[in-house]
């Protein structure tokens, strides 16, 4: 598999899926191997997906310094990938926690980002966070589901910090628009694909300076797609709308019936939305 060397000497791997113009894809988790992105619901038929394994995940090496797992310290990994690909500017897609990494990259290298696609993405880098109350609000949209009663309390414990491994397992259906065989298969890889040590460091103190990031992106003219799931609490559609308002050329799409992984819930709709935006 292709690889390159980060500025600190860490070997980082990436995977290429599909044909066409490249689309650099940053995985969330945080710190989950890019394998869970798959072909993004068939988007690889329209674009060449360049799936980065963040340091310490997937086929990338573990760095010598665990402190480099911090989100802002991975920005130059993305820049090193751009250089490796020989691209003057990039189309960038970020899922979930990788939204912060993509935003910090755009703030540091605004001229290098042609388009940014934020899929169920965080924006702590710009001072927007998702609250426990918002996540519970979305959870109660699932009150008619047969699994809701047994999963509700476990989901609450996930966000108040008291969850057991069994609670995490029970809460997984809330992250998908529908809990079916495809969702179960997708969710099954989460534990093995995630570097928990790295995840604990990713958003640690000092990672974000929202005022500086907003100032750096003032007048930024790249096109931005903010795609949220109708049933997702991270972000709720109205919070995604607030994120979109921070960019001069943003387009908001709320995918009907989708949760936190919209390409799993409705691959066709997801692919058409993103491919149309990218043009």
Image: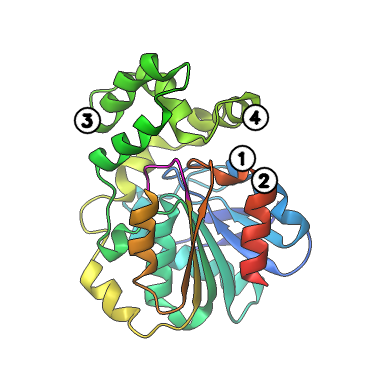
Mainly helix, strand or loop, the magenta region?
A: loop
Spatial CA distance of label 4 from label 2 is: 11 Å
Question: Going 47% across and 27% down the picture, which residue do you hit?
Answer: 173
Residue 233 highlighted magenta (yes or no): yes
Is the Cβ of the residue at disc 2 closer than 8 Å to that at disc 1?
yes
Q: Residue under circle 2? A: 267
On-image quarter of the C terminus: bottom right
Residue 126: percent from the left, percent from the top?
29, 65
Q: Residue under circle 1? A: 264
Q: Residue under circle 4? A: 182
Q: Residue under circle 3? A: 160
Q: Is residue 39 visible?
A: no
Is the Cβ of the residue at disc 4 closer than 8 Å to that at disc 2?
no
Ranked by sequence position, the earlier of labels 2 and 3 is 3
Residue 33: percent from the left, percent from the top?
54, 43
Question: Going 44% across and 67% down the picture, which residue do you hit?
Answer: 76
**Residue in the foreground of this view, choosing between 57 and 186:** 186
Neighbor class of circle 3 (other Cα within 10 Å; few <14, some 14-19, many 20+) is: few
Question: Going 27% across and 79% down the picture, which residue do you hit?
Answer: 215
Residue 260: percent from the left, percent from the top?
48, 42
């Amino acid at each position: 598999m292709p690889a390159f060397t980060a500025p600190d000497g860490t070997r980082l791997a990436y995977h290429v899926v599909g044909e066409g113009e490249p689309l650099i894809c940053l995985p969330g988790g945080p710190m989950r191997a890019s394998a869970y992105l798959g072909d993004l619901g068939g988007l690889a038929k329209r674009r060449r997906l360049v799936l980065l394994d963040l340091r310490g995940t997937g086929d990338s090496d573990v760095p010598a310094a665990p402190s480099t797992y911090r989100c802002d310290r991975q920005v130059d990994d993305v820049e090193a990938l751009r250089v490796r690909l020989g691209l003057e500017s990039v189309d960038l897609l970020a899922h979930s926690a990788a939204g912060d990494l993509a935003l910090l990259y755009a703030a540091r290298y605004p001229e290098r980002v042609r388009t940014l696609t934020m899929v169920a993405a965080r924006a702590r880098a710009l001072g927007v966070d998702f609250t426990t109350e918002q996540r519970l609000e979305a959870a109660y949209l699932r009150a008619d589901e047969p699994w809701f009663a047994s999963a509700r309390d476990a989901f609450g414990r996930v966000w108040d910090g008291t969850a057991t491994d069994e609670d995490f397992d029970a809460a997984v259906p809330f992250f998908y628009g529908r809990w079916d065989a495809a969702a179960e298969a997708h969710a099954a890889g989460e534990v093995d694909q995630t570097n928990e040590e790295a995840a604990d460091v990713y958003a640690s103190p000092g990672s974000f300076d929202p005022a500086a990031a907003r100032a750096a992106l003032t007048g930024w003219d790249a096109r931005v797609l903010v795609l949220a799931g109708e049933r997702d609490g991270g972000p709720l559609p109205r919070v995604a709308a607030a994120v979109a308002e921070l960019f001069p050329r943003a387009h908001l799409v709320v995918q009907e019936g989708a949760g936190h992984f919209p390409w799993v819930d409705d691959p066709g709709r997801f692919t058409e939305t993103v491919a149309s935006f990218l043009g």
